[in-house]
Image (tube, rainbow, N blue to C red):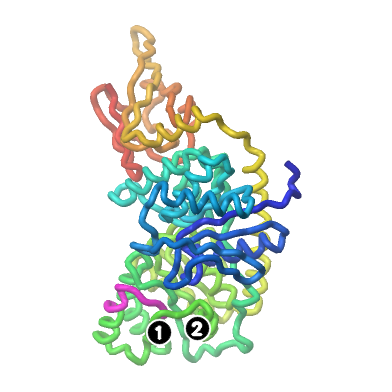
Amino acid sequence: MDDQTKHRILMVSDFFYPNFGGVENHIYYLSQCLLKLGHKVVVMTHAYGNRSGVRYMTGGLKVYYIPWRPFLMQNTLPTFYFTLPIMRTILVREKISLVHGHQAFSTLCHEAIMHARTMGYKVVFTDHSLYGFADVGSIHMNKVLQFTLADVTQAICVSHTSKENTVLRSGLPPGKVFVIPNAVDTAIFTPAPERLGTDEIVIIVISRLVYRKGADLLVEVIPEVCRLYPNVRFVVGGDGPKRVRLEQMREKHSLQDRVEMLGSVPHSQVRSVLITGHIFLNSSLTEAFCIAILEAASCGLLTVSTRVGGVPEVLPDDMIVLAEPDPGDMVQAIKKAISLLPMIDPQVMHVRMKNLYSWHDVAKRTEIVYNRALRCSNQNLLDRLSRRMDACHVSRTFRMTAHHHSNSEDKTTERTWLSPHIYPFHWRSAWAPQDLVPRTSTSPLLGRLDWMDGLLTRPTVTQPPRPGTSVVVPGLGSCFAWS
């Protein structure tokens, strides 16, 4: 297919306007830029309040608000095949050539991917978040992701950390996963016309006040910073269940005049809040990328953030101060940021952000992924069913051939590796390889593997596994049983 071919793309997610968030912004800005490149873009999401049916947005972006109501965290109730008639109508009516699903915990996204592949459409999936491996919710979500992505054509992640996480959770071949970061609209997020004075230093926090966003860290960090710096004031924008704790902290330490609680801030007013401050504070415990950091940097604020997930990949070292998600370390990072403020020029920072991040660049890179997806050959039905069935297994058995050296003779023995979850990983052994040398293994999901070359991640085994023992790899929760 010619790379200049214009595509007809269906974006699918439970998360879209009028709701606001990182996924919603990503879909909207990406769609607008793809429209400017000459592609046809249609969005499918669930109904929001009385917003149902077909609506048109800026640039002629057509949005189908299907009549499904959210039941939990803006997600629709899984309907399996009830979505198929509506999905098929949209695909046929709009003459769609490619389906692009967004976000791993979007029910509508998973259903659309399965229905589109059933109808023979090429599918691209973008993952915007990080997930764990140990808790019950993550285990179930990862199994759903393995099943859905078993037949996906190409995948996109917003950071290299996110890519590693997605590959581990879903079992996708790394060659099918691309990294395309988020961006920021620098025409909207501009610095204040005049540089702020430093007699009073204002630290801005704009975030959902929930555990995952580190609201509990703020409760410990803010009083300590206010004690060390009498000229520092905090402005906290956002709402959530942890807001009560912040208000209790403000009352307890008598900081009513130094900690301003704005409540929920509409996205259209975020820039107005950002330009009143000097430092942007992000206390998230997990982030795949964090668009809020880009918006703050584009407004000329120096960022202090926790060193988690894909955050270290977002900005150059001279535009961000990183800290461990620990109150003491965060206080030290804020002290360092305050000392760096005289060297920060908001206008220069804005120009750098304009050169670093652009939605038009994101759209062009996404277009390359679309072209690659449409060039992929169609798999036959048996191969597709085999991959789906592999993803359904509760546990997997690997046959691994190991070469055992002894003083008397060389033996080639076959071992069985049992794992409750499938994750491609890099076997790094600290024990002498002549004791037990892994040669090859065969996986129904990954095929034949050369273990000495390794794959992706970094579990370390410090002792050689002996017959009848098990090795638990920290971080992956996988158990290797040697017979």
| Crowding at mark 2 (Cα within 10 Å: few <14, some 14-19, many 20+) | some
Where does the C terminus fall, quadrant-wise? top left
Image coordinates for residue 158, horizontal then vertical, percent = 53, 55
User: Which residue is label 2 attached to?
Assistant: 273
* Observer able to see residue 67: yes
Q: Is residue 408 left or right of residue 174?
A: left
Tag 1 or tag 2, which sits nearer the N-term?
1
Apparent side of residue 124 relative to residue 105 in the rendered image (left or right)? right
Q: Is residue 441 above or below residue 65?
A: above
Q: Residue at x 52, y 56 (%)?
A: 12
Residue 328: image quadrant is: bottom left
**Above or below, 287 relative to 120:** below
Tag 2: residue type? Val
Q: Amino acid at mark 1?
A: Leu
Residue 320 spot, x, y in % from top left: 52, 68
Under circle 2, the secondary element is helix
Which one is nearer the viewer's eye here, 51 or 452? 51
Whether residue 244 appears in magenta in the rendering, the answer is yes
Query: Is label 2 in contact with label 1 (beta carbons under 8 Å)?
Result: yes
Nearest the camera: 414 or 222?
414
Image coordinates of residue 59 in percent, x first then y, are 66, 69
The answer to whether any part of residue 290 appears in the image is: no
Specify the segment rendered in magenta.
237-245
Distance (Cα) linking label 2 and label 1? 9 Å
Q: Which mark is residue 262?
A: 1
Q: Is residue 269 magenta?
A: no
- At label 1, counting other C-alpha atoms closer than 10 Å, the crowd grade (few under 14, some 14-19, many 20 or more) is few
